[in-house]
Amino acid sequence: MTELFIPTLGASRGERDLSNVWQRSIAETFPFHARVESAGLIAAWRELIEWADVEHSARWQPRRRPGGNNATYCNVYAWDISKQLHPQHADVIPAVWFNSRGLREIQEGAYTGAVFGENVVAVGANGLADWFAKFGEQFGWTVIPATIENEAEIYYAVNKGALGLISGANVNRAHAGHVAVVVPDGVETRKVGGEGLLQSQAGSANYALRRSRWFTSRSFNSSANNKARKLFVYKFI
């Protein structure tokens, strides 16, 4: 098979204040690396989180679906933030991934581009956890089980400049998983309450910054058939 890559849907069209085109990345950019050089890593992260304004920006707010279940966008927020950290604003995690047709096209050398619903499909939080477990290391991620004992490793990496995520697939695949961005922690952020790693997230509730060990919930317990996964992942980019 030809080497895999992260597919994209072309030009950016989304914006923080628009509640649509979620599989298109936001056109707006934050000068993250310039701010790291001038203000330092923790200050740049704080400014990036303030710029995103996840608690109020329309793009990442949960939405009521018919039947009462919320549509949530933790994976889109993680994707958007991840792109801001990449110097070329390229994808480092997938918003869409190949279905069987897309994989066959790549294998046969017939792939000419991503067409949503035909050769690529959306990657939700459950699918993202699966992707990290199957493809993460191939794409340069360090993947370790999300346990309290392993918090120190991801904390150390993130404070050294890595992009870190907590990714959990729900035991019940009919329900959403979750992914949160791990934020570097220092004197400026020690006042943030709670226990566990400092995080920023969208989801059923959106938080600019909070500490949480949500991955210890029974909803994300690992199972013998490995259909449920909870992972820490980090990558220096």
Image: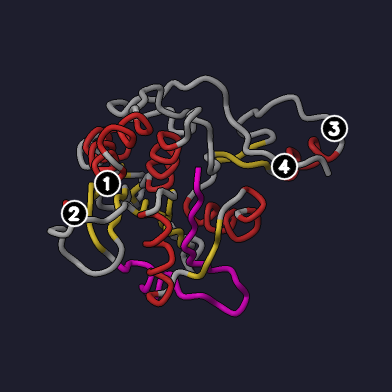
- Judging by the rendered image, the residue that carries numbered circle 3 is 109
Total marks placed: 4
Q: Image point 53% across, 41% down: which residue?
A: 92
- Do tag 1 and tag 2 residues touch (Cβ < 8 Å)? yes
Q: Position of residue 195 (x, y in %)?
A: 23, 69
Q: Residues within 10 Å of mark 3 (few under 14, many from 20)?
A: few
In this view, the mark in front (3 or 4): 4
What's under tag 3, amino acid-wise?
A: Gly
* Residue 42, label in figure: 1
Callout 1: few (<14), some (14-19), or many (20+) C-alpha neighbours within 10 Å? many
**Extreme residue in the front direction:** 38
- Rounded to the nearest angstrom, the CA distance separating label 3 from label 2 is 49 Å
Q: Is residue 151 left or right of residue 110?
A: left
> Where is residue 187, by image quadrant?
bottom left
Q: Is residue 185 left or right of residue 226?
A: left
Residue at the spot 62% in from the left edge and 75% down from the top edge: 225
The span shown in magenta is: 213-237
* Residue to which mark 4 is pinned: 4
Q: Nearer the viewer, mark 1 or mark 3?
A: 1
Q: Is residue 1 visible?
A: yes
The residue beneath circle 2 is 189
Mark 1 → mark 2, Cα distance in angstroms: 9 Å
Residue 10's spot in the image, x, y percent? 57, 22
Q: Residue at x 38, y 69 (%)?
A: 152
Quarter location, residue 15: top left
Q: Does 145 appear in magenta?
A: no
Quarter of the image where the N terminus is located? top right
Q: Residue at x 51, y 75 (%)?
A: 222
